[in-house]
Image (cartoon, rainbow, N blue to C red):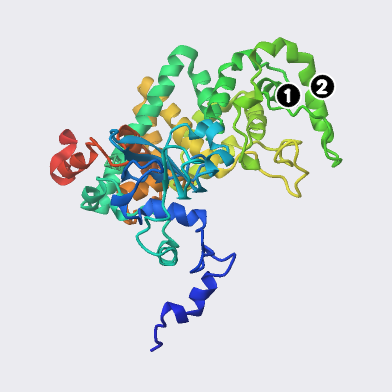
């Protein structure tokens, strides 16, 4: 059998220390990469009893926070006690130097307004904020050793930082866990349906549906501008418009039209010119409801998800005018589980748009092949968050139990939605390393409902969360529906 060599003789271990590989850490490295520092913080590989801010106050870390993958501070929801102050919940930013706070513009960025601790490798009281903690002298092992140990650890949550419900949930069988998540998902379906019903009472069924669809199209950073746009639908929707006219009005009202008319000479530049020609004629009429462009979050959005494209797709739905009826017909038509997602996508898909099928954005060049305006992921999100709850609540209000049960069947059979950072964190906190196959969207929805009902009302150390005791007391085989 092959002998295991000490790390010093291991050529692969030496490869890892080369510049540009992994953490790029050498034994003599004076400064670790920032990602390694983040991992050290997440796993608290520190002499935790010796932590002090640069101005000498002791720091007690009750929870380091959850690694944020969405920009802004590196860790969200940490629980930290500094000096004699009571413990506080807030964010933690990790930088190599204390001067990074100003150099990176964090002091001017409102996203960093909730930072309670600035963690740095090396700090200077003159350049740091008062709540800066330097790690250089408090690591619990040499950097090279930490680098080896932490290499693959950053995305996962250390065992001691999992939720307090993780242990009682581990006691449940897979079937019991699935049942629990399904129950939570059912609550989520009803709560979304109740929101739509309440809006329908004020604005009508169709308007409630359109607002829901627009919100869904704005996922996830542009929910509110899309909702606002939908709320003014009675004002900008005119029967008899062409697609171009309606797209121009929607893009104009939303403030998403580029100010520059110079387009690449790829033969499609005239589309923007024609849109502007339409919008110029109407702009004064809508002057009081044009959104500022700043209302949109456009930074980092994938071209396929750009709100310009979403708005252009919605114009087709609105002009056709029969989407609510087609959705009801889809619901009344028999579909096997495996046909659900494709059949709905067929109802929602826009056949072809002369410009948007061939361009991701106004600025992009013409694509070699036409691309659909709506993908499977968005269709699933619309199904789970808007369409099925809307159909369900309509059936309930109309006392149509057959349709209501059919909508529930579809909801629980719907294939899983795309994974995201919220779901990943929830799985790590609640289920740890346990592998539950999240094959359908309802299980994901159940998990999100637990986060909403429990995690969002507690903090990173699960203070006063009743979920663990509820899970412990729950014995599905004995309890029966009354006890649930
Ligand atoms: S807050 Fe409650 S539900 Fe969330 S992880 Fe902690 S114990 Fe679990």
Q: Position of residue 274 (x, y in %)?
A: 81, 26
Pick the residue in front: 81 or 297.
81
Image coords of residue 253 (percent x, y): 67, 20
Which residue is painted at 49% across and 54% down in the image?
35
Position of 208 with respect to 248 (left or right) is left
> Does the residue tagged 2 have its C-beta within 8 Å of any atom of ligand 1?
no
Relative depth, front residue between 396 and 318: 318
Secondary structure category for the residue under label 1:
helix
Residue 285: x and y in percent read 72, 10
Q: Do callouts 2 and 1 mark residues in contact (Cβ within 8 Å)? A: yes
Taking the spot 70% from the left edge, 26% from the top edge, the residue there is: 247
- Indicate the quadrant where residue 258 lies: top right
104, 122: nearer the viewer: 122
Is any atom of residue 368 visible in this view?
A: yes
In which image quadrant can residue 233 be found?
top right
Q: Which residue is mark 1?
A: 248
Q: Seen in the image, is 257 located left or right of residue 324?
A: right
Q: Residue furthest left?
A: 478
The residue where tag 2 is placed is 277
Work out how far the residue at label 2 is from the one at label 1, CA to CA, in angstroms.
9 Å
From the top left corner, tell me how far across and down residue 225 is, in percent.
Answer: 57, 24
Which one is nearer the viewer's eye here, 39 or 204?
Answer: 39
The residue that appears at 42% across and 30% down in the rendered structure is 389
Residue that lies at the very extreme toward the bottom in this rendered image: 1
Q: Secondary structure at mark 2?
A: helix
Disc number placed over residue 119 in the picture, else none: none
């Amino acid at each position: 059998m092959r002998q295991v060599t000490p790390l010093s003789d291991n050529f692969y271990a030496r490869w890892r220390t080369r510049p540009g590989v992994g953490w790029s850490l050498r034994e003599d490295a004076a400064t670790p990469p920032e990602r390694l520092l983040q991992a050290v913080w997440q796993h608290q590989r520190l002499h935790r009893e010796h932590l002090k801010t640069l101005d000498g106050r002791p720091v007690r870390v009750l929870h380091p926070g959850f690694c944020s993958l969405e920009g802004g501070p590196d860790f969200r929801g940490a629980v930290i006690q500094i000096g004699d102050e009571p413990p506080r919940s807030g964010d933690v930013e990790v930088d190599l130097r204390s001067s990074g706070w100003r150099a990176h513009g964090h002091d001017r960025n409102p996203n960093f307004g909730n930072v309670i601790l600035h963690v740095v490798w090396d700090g200077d009281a003159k350049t740091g904020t008062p709540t800066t903690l330097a790690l250089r002298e408090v690591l619990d092992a040499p950097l090279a050793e930490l680098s080896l140990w932490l290499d693959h650890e950053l995305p996962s949550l250390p065992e001691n930082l999992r939720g307090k419900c993780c242990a009682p949930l581990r006691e449940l069988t897979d079937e019991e866990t699935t049942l629990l998540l399904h129950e939570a998902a059912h609550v989520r379906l009803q709560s979304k349906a109740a929101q739509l019903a309440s809006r329908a009472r004020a604005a009508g069924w169709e308007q409630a549906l359109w607002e829901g669809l627009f919100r869904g199209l704005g996922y996830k950073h542009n929910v509110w501008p899309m909702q606002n746009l939908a709320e003014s639908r009675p004002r900008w929707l005119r029967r008899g418009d062409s697609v171009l006219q309606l797209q121009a009005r929607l893009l104009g009202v939303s403030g998403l039209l580029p100010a520059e008319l110079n387009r690449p000479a790829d033969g499609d530049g005239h589309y923007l010119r024609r849109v502007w020609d339409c919008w110029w004629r109407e702009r004064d009429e809508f002057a009081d409801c044009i959104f500022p462009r700043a209302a949109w979050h456009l930074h980092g959005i994938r071209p396929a998800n750009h709100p310009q494209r979403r708005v252009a797709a919605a114009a087709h739905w609105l002009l056709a005018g029969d989407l609510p009826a087609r959705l009801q017909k889809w619901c009344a038509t028999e579909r096997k589980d495996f046909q659900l997602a494709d059949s709905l996508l067929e109802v929602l898909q826009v056949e072809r748009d002369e410009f948007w099928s061939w361009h991701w954005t106004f600025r992009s060049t013409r694509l070699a092949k036409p691309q659909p305006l709506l993908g499977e992921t968005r269709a699933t999100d619309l199904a789970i968050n808007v369409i099925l709850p809307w159909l369900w609540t309509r059936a309930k209000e109309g006392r149509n139990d057959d349709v209501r049960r059919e909508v529930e069947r579809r909801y629980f059979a719907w294939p899983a939605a795309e994974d995201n950072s919220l779901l990943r964190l929830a799985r790590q906190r609640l289920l740890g390393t346990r592998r539950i196959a999240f094959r359908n969207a309802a299980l994901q929805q159940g998990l999100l409902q637990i986060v909403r009902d429990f995690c969002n009302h507690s903090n990173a150390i699960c203070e006063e969360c009743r979920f663990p005791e509820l899970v412990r007391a729950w014995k599905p085989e004995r309890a029966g529906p009354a006890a649930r």
